[in-house]
Each structure stands twice: as structure tokens, then as C-alpha cells.
Image: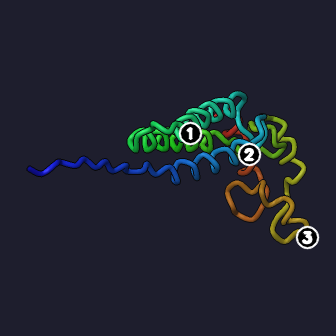
Amino acid sequence: MLQGHTHSIEIGVDKAALNALITNAQQKHDEAVEGNRIGQYPAGSKAALQAQIEIAKATANNPAATQAQIEQAALDLNAALQTFLALAIQKVEGDYNNDNTTSIGDLAIMVKAYGKSSVDADWNTVKAFDLNKDNMIDIQDLVALAKLILKW
């Protein structure tokens, strides 16, 4: 009679992609600044991302984690990272004083450039005020900015 032998094969769990994502997310987190300026992030957004990074780290460091758990942690962290990156404050059209809103202050700045055109020597410094792109700062640009201010 033959004696049966039992062999067990341990299939490793691949954590490389999750670990790389954790490193990337942590770097983005560490480089980010919370505030209200262009390129900054709303208050509390870094903490939300860090919480998801910690969950992913716990899964990556868990020797009993299954491949499915590792993959889910990677999906969750990637979603949190993409959400975080989308929260970065973007340039607001017509915001010339960089306060992240279009207001009468921006109109006052534009008025200083009123009458300038592409033939003027300082055009490169004022051409951002040419909202209708006709190579001159005129009443049409003032009206366009006023509409942005009033949200028309």
C-alpha cells in the first residue's frame, strides 16, 4: 500500500503595486499645502488622504492579507488620491488679485489697463485682461468681467 503525502504550496501575495501607490500618495500628501490659494488644498483634505494611506499601510503590513484585500486597498487608496488631487484650488477666470474669487477688486485692476492694445510695449503684462481676445482692453472686456462678477 502506498502512503499518501501531502504537500502544501504557499502562493505569495503581491504587495508591490500597493506599496508603490502608498509611497506615491504619501509624497503627494507631504508636498500638499492646505490653504485658499491656487494650487493649495481645502482644510482637512490632507487628513482624509492620510487616513486612507494608513488603512492601506495596515493592509500592506498585514501578513495574513489576501491578494483580494491588497487589491481592494490599492483601489481605495487610488480613489482617495484622485479625489484629493481633484480638490486642488484652480485659477478662477477673471481673478487678477489671486484671492480665488472674481470681484470688484479684479475690475479695478483691469481698469488700470483700459485702452491698452497689442501694439503697446507693455501688452504682455496686460493681455490677460483681454477676455474676448480681440487684442485690446476695452468696454467689452469690462462687461465680460462684470458678468463673471455677477455670475451672469
Taking the spot 81% from the left edge, 43% from the top edge, the residue there is 98
The image quadrant where one finds the C terminus is top right
The nearer-to-camera label among 3 and 1 is 1
Q: Quadrant of residue 145?
A: top right
Q: How many marks?
A: 3
| Mark 1 Cα-neighbour bin, 10 Å: few <14, some 14–19, many ≥20 | few
Report, in whole angstroms, how far the alpha carbon at label 3 lies from the one at label 2: 31 Å
Q: Nearer the viewer, residue 142 or 131?
A: 131
The nearer-to-camera label among 3 and 2 is 2
Q: What secondary structure is marked by label 3?
A: loop
Q: Nearer the viewer, residue 6 or 73?
A: 6
Q: x, y percentage for residue 122?
A: 90, 65
The answer to whether mark 3 and mark 2 are in CB contact below 8 A is no
Taking the spot 58% from the left edge, 34% from the top edge, the residue there is 52
Report, in whole angstroms, how far the alpha carbon at label 1 lies from the one at label 2: 33 Å
Q: Is residue 64 left or right of residue 106?
A: left
Q: Nearer the viewer, residue 100 or 82?
A: 82
Report, in whole angstroms, how far the alpha carbon at label 3 lies from the one at label 1: 62 Å
**Amino acid on which disc 3 is placed:** Ala
Q: What secondary structure is marked by label 1?
A: loop
Q: x, y percentage for residue 72?
A: 43, 40
- Pointer 2: what residue? 39
Q: Residue furthest left?
A: 1
**Amino acid on which disc 1 is placed:** Asn
The answer to whether mark 3 and mark 1 are in CB contact below 8 A is no
The answer to whether mark 1 and mark 2 are in CB contact below 8 A is no
- Pointer 3: what residue? 121
N-terminal label among 1 and 2: 2
Mark number for residue 61? 1
| Mark 2 Cα-neighbour bin, 10 Å: few <14, some 14–19, many ≥20 | some
Q: x, y percentage for residue 110?
A: 83, 48
Residue 147 shows in this picture: yes
